[in-house]
Image: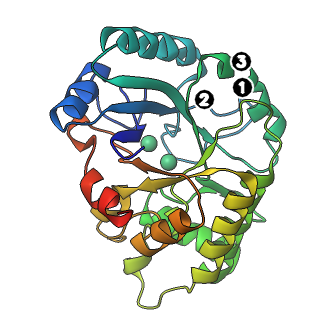
Amino acid sequence: MLSHDGHVHTPFCPHGTADTLAAYAEEARKKGLSGLTFTEHAPLPASFQDPVPGGDSAMHPDELFPYLEAVERIKQEYRGSLTILSGLEVDYIHGWEKETKALLQEAGPYLDDSILSVHFLQTDSRWHCIDFSREAFEAAALDAGGRGPLYHLYYETLLQAIQADLGPYKPARLGHITLIRKFQHAFDQQVDDTPRIREVLHHLAAAGMQLDANTAGRYKPECREMYPPETFVQEAAGMDIPVVYGSDAHRSDHTGADIQSVASLLD
Ligand SMILES: [Zn+2]
Ligand SMILES: [Zn+2]
């Protein structure tokens, strides 16, 4: 699916921009894409407290059906010129599997293509959003006993996400599997997580899940590489894991960013 952007946000994202769904679709058309999937952050379980200060990690529960209807409308508008798929980026939150399964049960019949992502990790003392800010990442590392243990917790949680029983509408694709590296260049020493990335790929292959080849990290000043880095995208393809390009656009002009460079990795 390398003329398709499988990871696009919308104005329903409280931490994104007001760019309209049509603006994303027009950008996709301008860049010559065949289609895109809108994957807005699914509402978090009501009983889960968003650890981000503004509580704006995901869409409000009341917005879920208006969002799905808006995607349905634009899908019809572009019928014949752009393949628009309806999706969600669903958080895997360890311990909230039952609630997540219930949400998927409700929204699933309206979804074509979704992503399961890990943004939240629980240390002994509290929940952290690992990609919110460098300060939040550092606080999480401190609570976890260091960056090494935090990386360990992240990859363990990805493996749990792959194994989790989320019902028949469980997303087929795992999101940005090296998000834990988002602030890597803020530190002098790097954590060697190469074996863990390979472990995740093996589990993805065994589970028949897809890889989100997500270019957003290239534009994060302290990351400067895609999620996961190119070499692992190629390894995934070599293991017959379906690779789906994703811009993770939160503004319309990022739709389809770098799609050619990801496509060329797989030639
Ligand atoms: Zn977002
Ligand atoms: Zn994400």
Percent position (x, y) of residue 228? 47, 66
3 and 1 marks in contact (CB < 8 Å): yes
Q: Amino acid under label 1? A: Leu
Percent position (x, y) of residue 174? 60, 51
Relative to 124, does residue 79 appear above or below in the rendering? above
1 and 2 marks in contact (CB < 8 Å): yes
If you read the primary sequence from the N terminus, does the residue marked by circle 2 or circle 3 appear first?
2
If you read the primary sequence from the N terminus, does the residue marked by circle 1 or circle 2 appear first?
2
Q: Residue at x 27, y 60 (%)?
A: 261
How far separated are the C-alphas under marks 1 and 2?
8 Å
Find the residue positioned furthest to the front: 267
Relative to 3, does residue 218 appear above or below in the rendering? below
- Residue on which disc 2 sits: 43
- Residue on which disc 3 sits: 106
Q: Nearer the viewer, residue 208 or 140?
A: 208
Q: Residue at x 31, y 32 (%)?
A: 34
202 left or right of 236 in image: right
160 left or right of 49 in image: right
How far separated are the C-alphas under marks 3 and 1?
5 Å
- Quadrant of the rendered image containing residue 194: bottom right
